[in-house]
């Protein structure tokens, strides 16, 4: 079985990846192909890949690994306002604003950056939903399972982790994985690339 965890970025993929390290009968990795290859979709069986970049090529990934009893797709989301605030601080949001909105945007135009981040959040999640043929994210659910697609809000990860564990037939240290689900791993610009780890309330 292969598991692909995708989202917008700044949505809790690192937290998810840390929890997956406690699973013993799967390998797992966070953005293992990022900045190393172009279009490399080779992932071994018995592996969990957590990478928001995969959302850009999701139709190609689905063509290679159709959703089935052997392949699970997890759409990971974060509450919109918090995710948008984090996305708007990303350096590459300037480029996305220019490409998507045809406007000049830089770190001195916070309102344009926020609007670009909102558009990015909405358009990326809509594209993922469409590709996976799931209900709209506007319904505000914390968990939805449709076929072999799982949609999870990271804020609810501690509550829904046992179901994910059961769906993939995970073996390992469940308590340690649950503890990781309650932590945040943040590599935001304000941290200058250093990992910040803090307990979730």
Image (tube, rainbow, N blue to C red):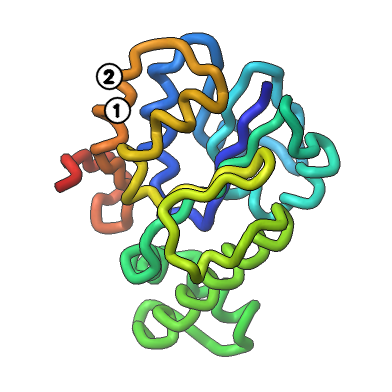
Picture quadrant where residue 1 is located: top right
| Picture residue at 53% right of the left edge, 23% below the top | 28
Q: Residue furthest right?
A: 63
Q: Which mark is residue 57?
A: none
Residue picked out by circle 1: 178
Q: How many marks?
A: 2
Residue picked out by circle 2: 175
| Picture residue at 55% right of the left edge, 15% below the top | 26
- Looking at the picture, how far across and down is residue 15, in whole percent? 36, 38
| Picture residue at 64% right of the left edge, 77% below the top | 99
Q: Is residue 95 above or below residue 149?
A: below
Q: Are marks 2 and 1 in contact (CB under 8 Å)?
A: yes
Query: 133 or 195: which is nearer to us?
Result: 133
Picture quadrant where residue 148 is located: top right
- Find the distance from the CA under tag 2 to the CA under tag 1: 5 Å
| Picture residue at 62% right of the left edge, 67% below the top | 126
Q: Is residue 37 above or below residue 116?
A: above
- Looking at the picture, how far across and down is residue 98, in whole percent? 59, 81
- Looking at the picture, how far across and down is residue 124, in whole percent? 60, 64
Left or right of residue 190, residue 109 in this image: right
Label 2 secondary element: helix
């Amino acid at each position: 079985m292969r598991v692909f965890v995708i989202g917008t970025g700044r949505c809790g993929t690192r937290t998810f990846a840390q929890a997956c390290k406690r699973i013993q009968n799967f390998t797992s990795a966070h953005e293992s192909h990022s900045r190393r290859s172009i279009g490399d979709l080779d992932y071994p069986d018995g592996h969990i890949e957590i990478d928001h970049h995969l959302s850009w090529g999701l139709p190609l990934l689905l063509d290679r690994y159709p959703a089935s009893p052997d392949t699970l797709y997890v759409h990971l989301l974060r509450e919109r306002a918090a995710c948008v605030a984090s996305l708007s601080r990303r350096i590459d949001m300037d480029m996305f604003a220019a490409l998507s909105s045809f406007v000049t945007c830089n770190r001195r135009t916070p309102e344009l950056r926020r609007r670009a981040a909102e558009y990015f959040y909405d358009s990326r999640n809509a594209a993922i939903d469409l590709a996976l043929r799931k209900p709209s994210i506007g319904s505000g659910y914390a968990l939805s399972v449709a076929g072999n697609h799982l949609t999870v809000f990271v804020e609810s990860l501690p509550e829904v982790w046992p179901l994910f564990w059961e769906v993939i037939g995970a073996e390992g240290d469940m308590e340690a994985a649950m503890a990781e689900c309650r932590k945040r791993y943040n590599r935001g610009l304000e941290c200058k690339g250093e990992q910040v780890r803090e307990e979730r309330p």
